[in-house]
Amino acid sequence: MRPPHGDTLGSGRRLGIPEFDHPAVGRPIVRATGLGRRFGGRPVLSGVDLEVAAGDFFVLTGPNGSGKTTLLRLLVGLLAPTAGTLEVHAERRSVGFLGHEPLLYRELTAVENLDLYGRLYRIPERRERIGMLLERFGLWDARAEVTATFSRGMLQRLALCRALLHDPELLLLDEPFSALDAEGAELLDAELAVHGARTIVVASHQPERVAALATGRLALI
Amino acid sequence: MTAAALLVAGLGLALFWAPEDADQGISQKIFYVHVPVALTAYAAFFWAAWKALRLLWKGGDRYDLESYTAVHMGVIFGVLTLVTGSIWAKVSWGHWWVWSERQLTLFLILFLFYSAYFMLRYSTDPGPRRARTSAVYSLFGVVLIPVSFMAIRLAEGLIHPVVFKRDGPDMDGTMFLTFCVCLAAMLALAGGLYLLELSGKRADANLRDLRERLA
Amino acid sequence: MSGYFADVAALARKDLLVELRTRDTVPAMLLFVVSALVVFHFALPEESSRLAASGMLWIALLFTALLALGRAFVGERDQGTIDGLILAPCDRSAIWLGKTLSVLAFLLFAEAVALPAFALFYESVTWELVAGLALANIGIASVGTLFGAMAAAARARELLLPLLFLPVAIPLIVGGLGATVSDDPGRYLAFLGVYDLIFAILSWASFEYVVTE
């Protein structure tokens, strides 16, 4: 497998897969009313209302412990709400998630990890897509090394590759910049800047970085 | 409600003094307690599994509470079954435990299984997952009942020679009536305790909800 | 449909690959089962019957299986990778099936060592024993994987799994031992088959409820 040449970020096309038919920008993709989640007896989140339209760049802010991670996990489907209602109009196969854990197998190489997810998500032209993402995020040289040897920044970059692998309609990112090194952060900035019709929800306790792109906001206390 | 349940239970107890069985004498009386208790335990486990199915189907806290309480009843009556069965074994054959008693062995296995149910609940954090996991486990429990019974029968020929055998008593009219009344009494007792415990748990849950909303 | 099995294959392959790289589970299982067989020598009286020796083999294999089952989901839960699998569009039951197949593979490796050891130390190995073992493996792996997932989400997980699993494993011991030593192994093998069918289907269908929040 050799890295494909170049990358056409500018036009919004993604190399390796046919042009993705994004839904009409503007319709709601996530809607929550009175959303709440309790752990044991302790309510971590309560009375959250939010609406995210397709193509939005939504920023969740709040101090540590305010429930941003819980809210994201509710949106992505890893947690079920204990109060309120939540509608997410995106199938599992078109939702991407970057959480606190990279969701990667330490004993497998970068390529093996992405290959597993590539198979599960039924990505066409899997190898080309994996190669392209690894190269874009500067991991091509480390592709055959087990992720146990990766630095934190490299792991986060690989996790980003995993989240973007299936070109999701809806991308949820939980403090993505916190574990990234400088180079990785720049790459992520570039990626977010051209999100196009992709809906993005970012949770960050330092939202200045993405403030310029934001079309919607929610501050949790 | 509980008063009515206990009344029926008491009635049953009073009645079984009526017919004295000539054959086995006093030991035979334990039958009137042992078998209804066993049947009640089975009923409780099946009730729990039914509620568990409802939980998995529809979801919601109330089925979880009901299933959990039913399992609790089942275990209580299961222990009673083991105790009365053991007493009966001692009286009949002089041993506190007899492996060839299939029902008893089955209850021992079920007791272990459903005790693990409580370990599972205590060890898992409360939430939708714990409810669902408990529900799945209690479904395994009722499926285990016939499978274990088959296993015990198969094991008999294999390991433990059948030394003691007991024929079920031939019941005439009065004995059958007594048995039925005792059975009804036990079921009513179980039902009453179930409702009592359930309302207590529901009250706890409501109190917790209120506290959270005020906080 | 082929997609489902492709998912299962990818997942099973992942588990086997991880085990190949770390060699955590299988070597421990091999050592454990042989150690257990040796310990049993000192626990069994001199003229032990075939029945007693075979019984000990089944117990040894059951506890060896618990080693593998105990580890099946703990790594996924601790590293959080189970979330990655839940998020994926594959059927949740495919996760169960992939994991069950890999546990079966580990059991087969362990038995490939245990049976010759048993033949060396105690009694010869008959085809009935192997058939019983094959059927019992399916039951152990099926139910054990499901219960392993339940236990992994709980706190005292190493303690919890044996408690959950042993009562359900009793019929397997009866069936397996019966197949090994009785005059009518067919009956016991049939019983194991019925057990496998019922519990494998039940485990397959209920995995989704146990692994998702």
Image: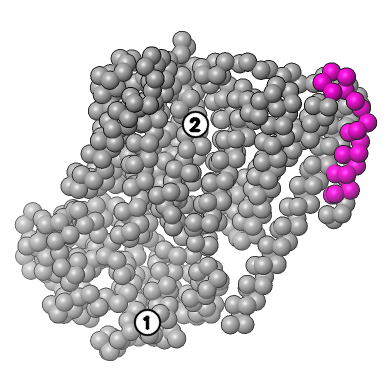
Q: Callout 1, which amino acid?
A: Asn
| Residue that label 2 marks | C170
Disc 1 target residue: A64
User: What residue appears at the point 61 percent right and 79 percent down from the top-left corner?
Assistant: B213
State the image coordinates of residue C208 (x, y, percent, origin top left): 45, 50
Q: Position of residue B100 (x, y in %)?
A: 61, 22
Q: Amino acid at mark 2?
A: Ile
The quadrant of the rendering that contains the C terminus of chain A is bottom left
User: In the picture shown, does residue A164 fall above or below A46?
Assistant: above
Q: Is residue A11 above or below residue A211?
A: above
Indicate the chain on which mark 2 is placed: C
Mark 2, Cα crowd under 10 Å, few <14 / some 14-19 / many 20+, is some
Report the residue at 20% width, 53% height from top.
A107
Residue B7 belongs to the span the image colors magenta = yes
> How far apart in space, not on screen, are marks 2 and 1 (Cα)?
49 Å
Q: Is residue A209 visible?
A: yes
Q: Is residue C38 magenta?
A: no
The magenta segment is B5-25
C140 to the left or right of B157? left
* Residues marked 2 and 1 touching at CB (< 8 Å): no
Q: Nearer the viewer, residue C3 or B62?
A: B62
State left or right for residue A172 relative to residue A12: right
Q: Residue at x 11, y 57 (%)?
A: A145
Occupied quadrant, residue C177: top left
State the residue in front, B117 or A32: B117
Quadrant position of residue B65: bottom right
Horizontal side of residue A218 vs B96, given as left or right: left
User: Residue A92: x percent and y percent?
Assistant: 38, 60
The secondary structure type at the circle numbered 1 is: loop
Q: Residue at x 68, y 17 (%)?
A: B165
Q: Name, please, the residue furthest toward the right.
A: B18
